[in-house]
Image (cartoon, rainbow, N blue to C red):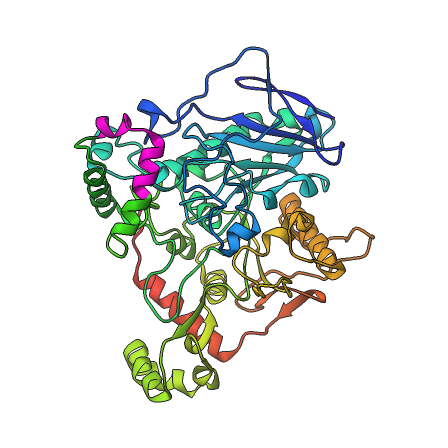
Amino acid sequence: MIREARTENGWVRGIEAADPRITAFRGIPFAAPPVGENRWRAPQPCKDWEGVRDASRFAPVSMQNIPGLGDDIYCREWHVDPDIPMSEDCLYLNIWTGAGKENEKLPVLVWFFGGGLQCGYTAEMEFDGERLARRGIVVVSVNYRVNVFGFLAHPQLTSQQPDAPANFGSLDQQAGLRWVLRNIAAFGGDPENVTIAGQSAGGGSVLSQMTCPDNFGMFQKAVIMSAMIRSPYEEGGVGVPQPLWEAEENGQHFFGFLGVSCLEEARKLDAAFIRDKYAEYLRTFSGMCPPMCTALDDRFCVGDPMELFLAGKHADVAVMAGNTSDEFLNFIPADSEEELEERAKELFGEEADTFLAFPESRRRDERRGYAGVSGTECTIKGIFANEKGEHGERYYYRFDPDIPGWDQPGTFHSSDLWFFFETLAKCWRPFVGHHYDLARKMCTYWANFIKTGNPNGLDADGSALEEWRPYTKENPCGMAFESAGPRALDGEETAFASFLTDRIIRSMERGKVWQDG
């Protein structure tokens, strides 16, 4: 087993995982600490070290609100440790490998965590890469700066560092990916067989990396989980990057809230003070000043990543994407059918009668309104069916099993992570046999895709997995992950869903913001 490896900056020593055939390397630096003058700069080169660096523990998480202090579902699920080490010095990555020697050329997964670009960390227990590593994958999870530390924009930044004025968290991810290409062979990985993957904001990060021209050719496959989010009932949506000038105005307002007049003063402030003031800032100006996220800087981010995807302006790679059945459902808020009809006329104009003729439009949820639909599912399928140009295969999935627990959560946003990583045993929920069977198969589909760009293959007992066919406009196929197991989807689109999908796509095509050339 590879227990020690030489990186470009020095030797690291890992530790055997629960399965001693797997080595876990944790807390490997891939860039210089982003502190002092490096705060709000693109990641800088890491310094060399002498001797063998211990890589047995995770490095501190990036600056964010202290996890584990609330009683929400995510504090119950995995943000459970308020005492987890936290530091602005956070640019480290982790590797799980089952390689016995350097030249094995195993396929590589590079994972970006979610958390709305405001929180999250690689040490979350559901992201344990051991089960994937047992399937012959080298798993890498990359930490990155979040919230104000990762996504501040300010006119001084734009003038002083025009080549990297914003999106520092995204640049951290990019730097981690580049480190992998330069170093992963030492851990038995193949730098020419790389998949980037992420969920929620991590999936949005995959979209951002896919549509950054500087990254074309750096990876061969992509997995986008619960991140292609648009609604058929309103314009815009989650993940639309903010114009740089608006992000700069937000940064200026925040500096005023901090009590500083310039970038130099802000770089001297204590990191915990900035973190706490940012949380206070968002509370104070809720609805007026948005959280700091991706900005259109025309350097890393050259347009809305989903619109770029639809236009075929992205890395030419195979893509797997999907959603959970209960997340981000969209409704038309109305208390009666009369109000529904009025809202439909406002939303759909000349197409209102067509919309109202669908029986599904009259279906009402007592709490949320009429015409419930998964805009995320519609968006993924719409982009897959309508994207321009030649491209690799597209695989769609829907996660829809029972999720046990006293809170009766349904297939809540992020619940599929336990299954794709096959880490159910770490969860408090009373999962039973069929959940473990489903997780084993989901993890195997994922490993197959990471290896070859095709999720199909054999289960652990040697039997063939249910065939997962690519999604195309002519053959809208996919895979449903249900309590009884994987079930192939083949042409199950309804006329109602197709109508709303078409609306989402037309809305995206009207909102083009990318730059040609």
Q: Main secondary structure of the magenta part?
A: helix
Q: Is residue 165 left or right of residue 195?
A: left
Q: Is residue 158 above or below residue 36?
A: below
In-front residue for pair 164/143: 143
Residue 101 seen from this side? yes
Q: Position of residue 421 (x, y in %)?
A: 64, 47
Quadrant into which the N terminus falls: top right
Q: Position of residue 291 (x, y in %)?
A: 32, 48
Residue 517 seen from this side? no
Q: Is residue 116 left or right of residue 166?
A: right
Q: Position of residue 63 (x, y in %)?
A: 41, 36
The residue at 42%/73% (across/down) is: 500
Is 268 inside the magenta-drawn segment? yes
Q: Quadrant of residue 395?
A: bottom right
Q: Quadrant of residue 62?
A: top left
- Which stretch did the figure color magenta? 263-278
Quadrant into which the C terminus falls: top left
